[in-house]
């Protein structure tokens, strides 16, 4: 294999290694978040919590309503019982009475909205719980599949590494070092073709003298444009 072809083969292998690694990481992430189960459990828990909070609020409002109601009827008795004849005192009680009735109405009004929140949260909780049960079943199967896929990818990856070593052994240290250095910042395009006078790595048009040099060379040439290894496109 020519040096150029060895470098291109090395680059292709490296690209595939990167892809395998990414797929492997994606599978690992799926295992980590249990295919979305952790998120779904969290959603269930939140709805349950919301329902509980709304129910506590309803109970608090109902107790406040009862307290206010008995106070209102107490005042009504004093107001209409005929025992108070002092006008000033009567006015004061009337003011207290109307303020308390306003409070009572307010408390009464806010009970249904909190009951609605509790009911809606309960509905969502039921829905998410059902979904959770289904997904938990699916996940068991998926997990077995993931472990299988991960193993295949790992084996393929290791085989590719062996293949890479073989290809690498046919490349001189000078070119290998150059390739590795450029690959770090430009994975997949450390060695590129020059097409119609343009470097396909950085898309800069090269001077004629350099193009001729690349055309005549048996080995890749370091481009003056971007330091990539350049070969001539036939
Ligand atoms: Zn270039």
Image (spheres, helix red, strand yellow):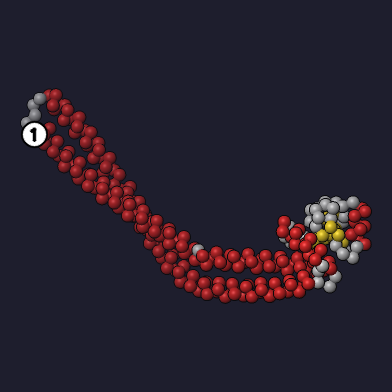
Instruction: Give the residue furthest to the left.
Output: 83
Residue that badge 1 annotates? 81
Q: Residue at x 8, y 29 (%)?
A: 84
Q: Nearer the viewer, residue 21 or 93?
A: 21
The residue tagged with tag 1: helix, strand or loop? loop
Whether label 1 lies within 8 Å of ligand 1 gets the answer no
Residue 1: where, in percent of width, then height?
A: 84, 73
Residue 9: where, in percent of width, then height?
A: 78, 69
On screen, 21 above or below 102? below
The reply to whether residue 1 is visible in this rendering is: yes
Q: Nearer the viewer, residue 125 or 116?
A: 125
Residue 149: where, in percent of width, then height?
A: 59, 73
On screen, 167 above or below 197? below
Q: Residue at x 11, y 36 (%)?
A: 77
User: Is the C terminus in the top left, top right, bottom left or bottom right quadrant?
Assistant: bottom right
Q: Residue at x 17, y 28 (%)?
A: 92
The quadrant in which residue 177 appears is bottom right
Q: Residue at x 12, y 24 (%)?
A: 87
> Going by the image, does 128 lie left or right of 61?
right
Q: Nearer the viewer, residue 191 or 60?
A: 191
On screen, 212 above or below 156? above
Residue 55: where, in percent of width, then height?
A: 30, 52
The reply to whether residue 233 is visible in this rendering is: no
> Going by the image, does 80 lie left or right of 162?
left
């Amino acid at each position: 294999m020519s040096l150029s072809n060895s470098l291109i083969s090395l680059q292709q292998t490296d690209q595939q290694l990167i892809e395998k690694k990414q797929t492997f990481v994606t599978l690992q992430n799926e295992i980590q978040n249990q295919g979305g189960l952790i998120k779904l459990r969290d959603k269930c828990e939140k709805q349950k919590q919301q329902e509980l909070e709304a129910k506590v609020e309803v109970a608090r409002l109902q107790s406040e309503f009862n307290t206010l109601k008995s106070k209102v009827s107490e005042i009504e008795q004093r107001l209409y019982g005929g025992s108070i004849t002092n006008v000033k005192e009567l006015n004061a009680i009337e003011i207290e009475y109307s303020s308390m009735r306003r409070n009572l109405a307010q408390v009464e009004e806010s009970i249904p909205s909190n009951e609605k929140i509790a009911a809606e949260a309960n509905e969502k909780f039921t829905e998410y719980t059902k979904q959770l049960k289904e997904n938990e079943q699916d996940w068991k199967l998926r997990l077995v599949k993931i472990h299988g896929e991960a193993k295949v990818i790992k084996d393929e990856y290791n085989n590719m590494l062996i293949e890479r070593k073989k290809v690498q052994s046919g490349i001189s240290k000078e070119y290998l070092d150059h390739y590795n250095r450029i690959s770090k910042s430009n994975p997949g395009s450390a060695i590129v073709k020059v097409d119609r006078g343009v470097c396909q790595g950085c898309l800069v048009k090269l001077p004629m003298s350099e193009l001729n040099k690349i055309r005549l060379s048996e080995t890749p040439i370091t481009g003056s444009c971007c330091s990539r290894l350049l070969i001539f496109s036939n």
